[in-house]
Amino acid sequence: MRALTPLCWQLLLLSTLVYCSLGQGGASLSVSPDRSQFFLLESVSLSCEVQGTSAGWRVKRNTVSGERSDCGRKWGKQQGSSCNVSLIPSDSGVYWCESESGEHSNAVNITVHDGAVILESPALPVTEGDSVTLRCRYLGTPSDLTADFYKDGSLIRTETTGEMTIPAVSKSDEGLYKCTNSKGESPESWMTVTATRPPTPSFSPPTSLLSSPLLLPLSVSGLVAALSISLIILLVLFCKRNKDIEDEPRDVTYADVRIIQDPEPRRRREKSTDRVDSAVKTVVLYKTPTYSHV
């Protein structure tokens, strides 16, 4: 196989690094059930959803008391890249996924309430245009009491069913929410609203699949990976073609030929010319009339 030029090797190395970096991917922390507030002794499952392999990723937390630790040491039960926790008030805090190399996922704030009322609001960010339902839940029976809902400290709605639905959430709906009913008041939780998803192409998968939060990143990564592989193949073909062109014999042109004049024939021609000129001059001399002849 012919050797590639240094420039080709550099381009191929750069393309390979771009492609390999796609395999690293990022991680996303998912919460099941998807809410930020829980009653005492309720269970929650925290999972690290990774683009590629999930090996080496663990769920970590920083509690309100300032304790930072991994799942499975002093709290929770680690199962692969997931962590199951039976919650107590000291479990309130910030949770995230972290790799062995120090990469981080998104963070989720979880509150464990030992009172009688909580607000069921999404722990993960919601997308503009989606329908979002907030529930003011009572620990006893019935759980769906008439509730007042507050945003950033101001009353926004009273619902007899105990739940409030926002049909198409927008960025203006982002904020700090809580609820109250006849049995008590819930803690406050922040609801994050992200930008609108791009328009769905005609060849997209069914709508039920689009609800997955990792579908869009995976689709983008797949597209970039395909482009990177195509770039590597094109670079190999381009470099091979240039090498073949360099190895092909070129047509000889006038510029490639150095003309060397032999001085010896030139001197012989000059001597021959001198003899002819001398003979001509002699004939002319004898043929020229003079006064003595006259």
Image: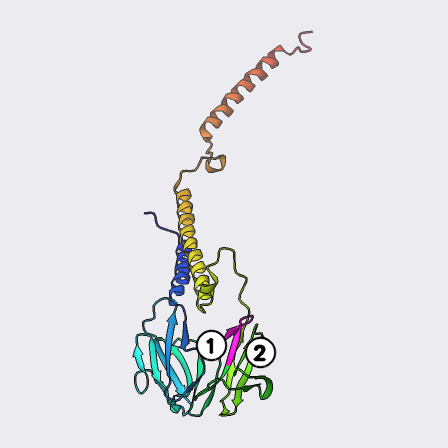
Instruction: Give the numbered dot on residue 124.
Output: 1
Instruction: Give the numbered dot on residue 173.
Output: 2
Tell how many labels. 2
Marks 2 and 1 sit apart, C-alpha to C-alpha, by 15 Å
Q: Which residues are magenta?
A: 123-134
Q: Is residue 287 left or right of residue 62?
A: right
Q: Identify the residue shown where x is 47% and y is 24%.
A: 268
Sequence-earlier tag: 2 or 1: 1
**Which of 113 and 163 lies nearest the eye of the viewer?**
163
Q: Residues within 10 Å of mark 2 (few under 14, many from 20)?
A: some
Kind of residue at badge 1: Leu
**Which of 89 and 246 lies nearest the eye of the viewer?**
89
On-image quarter of the C terminus: top right
Q: Is residue 258 left or right of residue 284?
A: left
**Which of 274 and 231 lies nearest the eye of the viewer?**
231
Q: Identify the residue shown where x is 38% and y is 77%.
A: 97
Q: Would residue 91 be counted in the magenta stretch?
A: no
| Above or below: residue 259 compared with residue 68 | above
State whether residue 73 appears in this view.
Answer: yes
The quarter of the picture where residue 17 lies is bottom left
Helix, strand or loop at label 2? It is helix
* Colour mapping: rainbow
Query: What is the x, y in percent for residue 52?
Result: 36, 66
The quarter of the picture where residue 219 lies is bottom left
Kind of residue at badge 2: Asp
